């Protein structure tokens, strides 16, 4: 299973893996030639197309030499390109879209029997992803989709055309899934939606999202609640209050800015302006001084002037983001922005992009340095520290504000396991991570850690690696923008 793009795609891939395992498939052993390769694709940025077709080309010799091997392509790019995929790569066996991931096992079987490619793209959601079987990579941290689709009409974004109109799950269904996850050992959930804080519009409750956060706070055993991604237009005071007043809702907020220029925001068809965004930042800081804010920013949108870009730098300076995921504008056919005048030269966009990164790196470092000497409780997790496996005696995890923390651990049965909570004191700060040079002063063994140990058939005596809020390919150095629909909200 190869997943590209946003958190919704990660969640969908967990469901696809669950469906395939229910159908009798097992994961291919590392280093072996698999019988099935599934690509779950993204279409938000132009290089997504090149990445998919390049990977398909590299796979063709393996398929030619391995009779019976199947290749399936799903996700947003499949929804967009449809039959074009098998035209350009006729060795692909199945193409399925964002609305019918549950049909993958049947399509694979049909392709095997009929010995020809199966392309099935639905125009509307058939089955809400969270009702499907799941094969989660983490035993202690889980995605919970509360909505799918998006009702916004941002001119740069292709997501609404590929994911469809927003559909909300009933609160009782969401909470039932969260309780079931906690009973299974999960200690952290991330509520997921293309526009997560618009939740409730479909069933007529504008305060449904704040109520959902508070209800999650009443679930015994649920240590951490996060959500992604909200839209500034729908970010209301009741959500800020719920975050501040619900102990297990983490002091961390990812809120896409996209541009600091009100003129460009209007051209993007974003229904807020600079003043509105900064007012939300101010309210969040007042209610939760310890909160870490992250954002998405697009550089080089058509018609962006140097003055417009200066407004973006101003908002970044004022907002003091802990991290910014930065895009260079990518022209996507089928979006209104692709037809706008004023497409900028690549060299201008690149120069502005580098200036933005330089400013954000400085701010990220300064904000992280404020934590020096402070004790933080880290959720030990698997996969967050890229070098953990090559660094004996080191583990990594996420602080409550989602900052990445590396720290030393003792060897032996006392080492914290993924899912356990370790209290460490920060002694070094870099722009994109923190370091504690001394071992934890306290390790809180959790049911999540027990679940991890049971799943892995061990008591985790080596250095842990970790995952707080899962991301796809998020680097420790300056983060590029996350491809995908959640980042486009």
Image: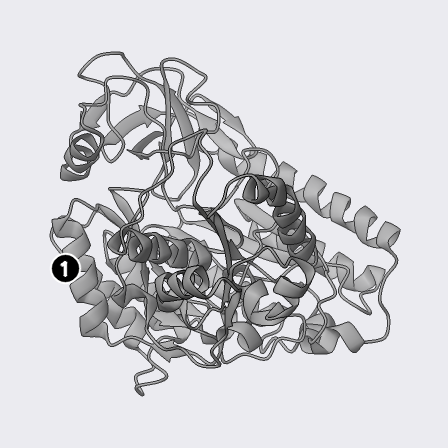
Image position of 359 with respect to 18: above or below: above
Q: Is residue 217 visible?
A: no
Under tag 1, what secondary structure? Answer: loop
Q: Is residue 142 visible?
A: yes
Task: List x then y, in percent, for residue 204.
Answer: 31, 88
Image position of 333 with respect to 71: above or below: below
Q: Relative to the observer, which residue lies in front, 18 or 116? A: 116
Horizontal relation, residue 240 to residue 73: left or right: left
Q: Relative to the observer, which residue lies in front, 222 or 25? A: 25
Image position of 101 with respect to 318: above or below: below
Query: What residue is rendered at 40% in x and 46% in y?
Result: 470
Task: List x then y, in percent, for residue 190.
Answer: 33, 55
Horizontal relation, residue 84 to residue 412: left or right: right
Residue at the disc numbered 1:
218
Image position of 32 with respect to 72: above or below: above
Residue at the extreme bottom of the image, as rendered: 204
Query: What residue is rendered at 85% in x and 54% in y?
Result: 346
Q: Which of the 4 image quadrants contains residue 197?
A: bottom left
Q: How is the image coloured?
A: one colour
Query: What residue is rendered at 41% in x and 63% in y?
Result: 113
Q: Which of the 4 image quadrants contains residue 376?
A: top left
Neighbour class for label 1 at 10 Å: few (<14), some, many (≥20)?
Answer: few
Q: Which of the 4 image quadrants contains residue 436?
A: top left
Task: List x then y, in percent, for residue 365.
Answer: 57, 34
Instruction: Count the marks.
Output: 1
Horizontal relation, residue 432 to residue 86: left or right: left
Query: What residue is rendered at 44% in x and 16% in y?
Result: 391
């Amino acid at each position: 299973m190869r997943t590209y793009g946003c958190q919704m795609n990660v969640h969908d891939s967990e469901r696809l893996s669950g469906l395939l395992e229910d159908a009798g498939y097992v994961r291919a052993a590392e280093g072996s030639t698999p019988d099935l390769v599934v690509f779950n694709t993204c279409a938000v940025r132009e290089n997504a197309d090149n990445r998919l077709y390049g990977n398909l080309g590299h796979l063709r010799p393996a398929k030619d030499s391995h009779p019976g091997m199947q290749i399936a392509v799903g996700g947003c790019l499949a929804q967009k390109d449809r039959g074009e995929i098998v035209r350009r790569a006729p060795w692909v066996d199945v193409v399925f879209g964002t609305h019918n991931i549950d049909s993958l096992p049947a399509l694979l079987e049909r392709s095997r029997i009929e010995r020809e490619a199966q392309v099935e793209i639905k125009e509307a959601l058939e089955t809400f992803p969270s009702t499907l079987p799941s094969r989660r990579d983490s035993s202690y941290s889980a995605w919970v989709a509360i909505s799918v689709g998006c009702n916004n009409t941002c001119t740069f974004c292709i997501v609404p055309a590929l994911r469809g109109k927003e559909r909300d799950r009933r609160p009782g269904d969401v909470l039932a899934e969260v309780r079931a996850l906690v009973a299974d050992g999960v200690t952290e959930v991330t509520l997921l939606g293309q526009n997560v804080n618009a939740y409730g519009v479909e069933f007529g409750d504008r305060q449904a999202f704040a109520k959902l956060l508070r209800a999650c706070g009443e679930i015994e055993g649920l240590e951490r609640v996060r959500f992604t991604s909200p839209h500034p237009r729908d970010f209301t005071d009741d959500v800020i209050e719920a975050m501040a007043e619900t102990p297990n809702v983490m002091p961390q907020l990812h809120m896409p800015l996209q541009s600091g220029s009100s003129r460009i925001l209007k051209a993007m068809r974003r229904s807020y302006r600079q003043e509105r965004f900064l007012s939300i930042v101010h309210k969040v800081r007042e209610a939760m001084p310890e909160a870490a804010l992250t954002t998405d920013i697009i550089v080089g949108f058509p018609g962006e002037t140097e003055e417009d870009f200066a407004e973006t730098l101003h908002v970044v300076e004022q907002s003091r983001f802990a991290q910014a995921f930065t895009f260079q504008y990518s022209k996507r056919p089928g979006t209104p922005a692709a037809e706008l005048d004023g497409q900028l030269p690549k060299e201008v966009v690149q120069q502005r992009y580098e200036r933005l990164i330089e400013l954000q790196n400085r701010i990220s470092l300064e904000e992280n340095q404020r934590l020096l000497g402070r004790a933080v409780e880290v959720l030990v997790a698997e996969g967050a520290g890229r070098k953990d496996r090559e660094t004996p005696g080191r583990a990594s995890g996420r602080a409550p504000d989602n900052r990445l923390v590396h720290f030393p651990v003792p060897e032996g049965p006392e080492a914290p396991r993924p899912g356990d909570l370790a209290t460490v004191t920060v002694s070094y700060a870099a722009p994109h991570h923190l370091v504690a040079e001394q071992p934890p002063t306290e390790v809180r063994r959790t049911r999540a850690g027990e679940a991890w140990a049971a799943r892995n058939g061990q008591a985790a005596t080596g250095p842990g690696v970790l995952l707080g809020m899962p991301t796809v390919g998020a680097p420790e150095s300056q983060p590029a923008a996350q491809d995908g629909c959640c980042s486009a909200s």
